[in-house]
Image: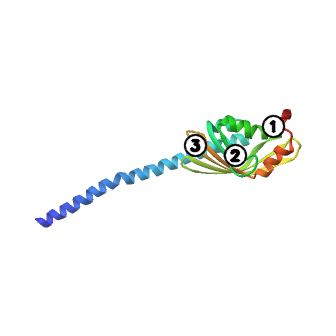
Amino acid sequence: MIRNFRLAAGLAGIVVTAAALAPTAVLARTTDEGLAAQARHNKAVVSAAFERWAAGGSDFFTEILAPNVIWIIEGSGPSAGRFEGRDAFMERAVAPFAGRLSTPVRPVETEVWADGDHVIIRWDGEGVARDGQPYENSYVWIFRLVGDQAMEVTAFLDLAPYDDVLRRIPAPGGE
């Protein structure tokens, strides 16, 4: 009788332990599946925006960036820095550069990876400066998306050719 009681108690302990662990296993699987689905969705959002940009679209930054985005250009030199808000980034980084181009920079090759709410895109861009010289650069941008917009972006690029365009070509309107 005692032996059967101990056996029953031991089995009950195993059942209770298994029941306690089962939700954790289900939660872990559900969380992994949810993160994978989120990553697939975010990758699709960023990839589609890049495809529209490469095809000639001009709304990439207003489409993908949240109004209160934090954009960081890594590196050293006058163009590196932190931009708080889409308008500040557009006014201080995009417009001065784009105004010195006769053909806008377009992505010509991209590779995209995603993990949860982060999307990493390595891309090569080409354009033409107003003096007729080609502009080519390689970039890595790391987005943190909330919904379908980037809240944080960290950008890596070779700042030498970027800064060369800013230095070499006068700003439109003599700014």
Q: Amino acid at mark 1?
A: Gly
Mark sitting earlier along the chain (1/3): 1
Q: Which label is found at residue 81?
A: 2
Seen at 51% across and 50% down, the residue is 36
Q: Amino acid at mark 3?
A: Leu
Residue 130 visible in the current orientation: yes
Residue 57 visible in the current orientation: no
- Label 3 near label 1: C-beta < 8 Å? no
Q: Nearer the viewer, mark 1 or mark 3?
A: 1
x and y, in percent, of residue 31 in the image: 45, 49
Element on which disc 1 rests: loop
Mark 3, residue position: 145
Residue furthest to the bottom: 3
Q: Which label is found at residue 99?
A: 1
Compared across the picture, whether 140 is left or right of 28 comes to right
Q: Which label is found at residue 15?
A: none
